[in-house]
Amino acid sequence: MTKNCRMVKRCKERVINLGLSMIAEELEMYDEFLCKNRQAHPEWYVERKDETTLLTSLGSVTYHKTLFKNKFNREYEYLLDRVMG
């Protein structure tokens, strides 16, 4: 492999890693918004934070999301998953 090809490969890897980091950061920002915006879903309270991995076209993204528990029916749900579809 030529020096030029190695440079291009390293550049591509860095861009992909940057994209994966941006995706993780964006997901965690949405999740934080859901935690702080209590009036939008008053029937839910925070149970815990979990680490999860999502497979994307860029590769695997590892991030943290919040598990919520419903005050009335006692069900658990990641509200981020609901918002993200």
Image (cartoon, rainbow, N blue to C red):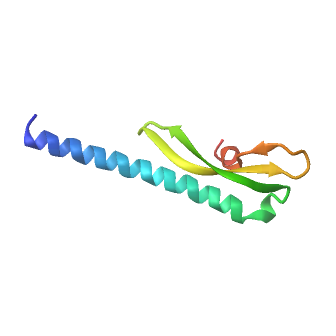
- All told, the count of numbered labels is 0
- Please report the residue visible at 24 percent of the width from the left and 48 percent of the height from the top: 11
How far from the left and from the top, in percent, is residue 31? 63, 56
Question: Quadrant location of the C terminus?
Answer: top right
How far from the left and from the top, in percent, is residue 45? 79, 57
How far from the left and from the top, in percent, is residue 79? 71, 49
Who is closer to the viewer here, 20 or 76?
76
Horizontal relation, residue 55 to residue 42: left or right: left
Q: Residue pushed farthest top?
A: 1
Horizontal relation, residue 21 to residue 40: left or right: left
- Please report the residue visible at 66 percent of the width from the left and 44 percent of the height from the top: 81
How far from the left and from the top, in percent, is residue 33? 65, 62
Horizontal relation, residue 12 to residue 68: left or right: left
Q: Residue pushed farthest left?
A: 2
Residue 5 vertical position relative to residue 79 in the rendered view, above or below = above
- Please report the residue visible at 15 percent of the width from the left and 41 percent of the height from the top: 6
Residue 45 vertical position relative to residue 61 in the rendered view, above or below = below
- Please report the residue visible at 48 percent of the width from the left and 50 percent of the height from the top: 23
Horizontal relation, residue 39 to residue 14: left or right: right
Question: Quadrant location of the N terminus?
Answer: top left
Residue 23 vertical position relative to residue 29 in the rendered view, above or below = above
